[in-house]
Amino acid sequence: MNNSIHRIIISGGGTGGHIFPAIAIAEELKSRLKNADILFIGARGKMESKVVPEAGFKMESIVIAGLERKLSLNNLLLPWRILQGLVQTFFIFRRFKPSKVIGTGGYVSLPTLFWAYVMGVPFYIQEQNAYPGLVNRIMARFAQKIFVAYPKLDKYFPAGQISMTGNPVRQNINQAHSTAQAKEYFGLEADKPVVLAIGGSQGARGINTAIRQHLDFFQEEHLQLLWQTGKQFTETLPHYTQIVALPFIQDMSLAYAAADVIISRAGAIALSELALIGKPVLLVPFPFATDDHQTKNAKAWTDIQAAYFCPDKDLAEQLPHLVLGLFKNPDMGKNAKTLARPLATQSIVNEILHEK
């Protein structure tokens, strides 16, 4: 192997919460290392198969599946699929000969971290949530370092291997825009406050349902609504001049700049972005997230009074009261800022490359 070439495998997938931090780390590595050869390992047919190549990185797909939380015939095939993934990953390692390996979570990272351990390749784990995923909990004891975004994770990981770096986020998320410029971009009025409602690229059914029931509330309170509905949302809405509903918001930095208060799910990467933004936020965790980790993420925020929290099932009833409460609590944003880690990606790569 040519020692001047840094051969690095990165694995993580299934959701954007695992994929986007992996891409951010890869981009930082590529910018630092002239001879970086970076390869992603992802699950065939999953989100990473599209997103990683679009970001300009090579990816090898493996056949792999995770345990379904409900009774399913697919669980009977799980041992066979894990074996397939292990065999495919072994041959990828033999061909590529990595010098370092990074796992960002999801069941697809298990074969990668397993072979890194067996073959003596140093590996690193990046955990996004307040409650770690199963693969990361299993493999953490063998990792060189575990990069985390929340305190008190020594309950799950060896304390000496933990590094509190925060989560990598999109490079342009905190880009400076004036509020007036951002409101003009979305066709919003300059002199009226804005509520931003986001539920991820697929939307959030609970948030969408609650907002749909209270459109008149926004009108009556003279609140403008910038609403990312998700591409699956197809309902016909009444024509309200103060409501801008979009399937997807391409430039979230502009949306954050336009907002006075925010309604959001409690995914780890969304929270890392919201901490950088530092505005009052109502968190509505996705109720079916693995191990209910979004509720645990939200609790870490409410513990320091950085957000309101509302269960998905109660949002339709409580939405008006909670939204008005956000406007009365500007200190929430200041408290959220204490969780911000704007240099998270650089810190992670510094430790991977043993730089200060």
Image (cartoon, grey):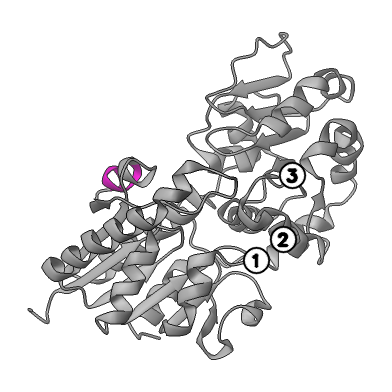
Give the distance between the C-alpha atoms of the residues marked 1 and 2, in whole angstroms: 6 Å
Residue, disc 1: 130
Mark 2 or mark 3, earlier in chain: 3
Bin the neighbour count of mark 3 within 10 Å (Cα to Cα): few under 14, some 14-19, many 20 and up.
many
At 27% from the left edge and 70% from the top edge, which residue is drawn? 32
Disc tally is 3
User: From this viewpoint, is residue 15 visible?
Assistant: no
Q: Quadrant of residue 94?
A: bottom left
Local secondary structure at mark 3: loop
Residue, disc 3: 284
Q: Quadrant of residue 320?
A: top right
Mark 1 or mark 3, earlier in chain: 1
Local secondary structure at mark 1: loop
User: What's the amino acid at mark 2?
Assistant: Lys
Bin the neighbour count of mark 2 within 10 Å (Cα to Cα): few under 14, some 14-19, many 20 and up.
some
Magenta residues, as a range? 51-55
User: What's the amino acid at mark 3?
Assistant: Val
User: From this viewpoint, is residue 23 visible?
Assistant: yes
In the rendered image, the vertical position of residue 195 relative to residue 100, given as above or below = above
Residue, disc 2: 296
User: As drawn, is 331 to the left or to the right of 342?
Assistant: right
Quick one: 309 or 350, which is closer to the camera?
Answer: 309
Circles 1, 2 touching at the beta carbon (< 8 Å) = yes
Task: Tell me where residue 91 appears, x and y as whole percent.
Answer: 16, 64
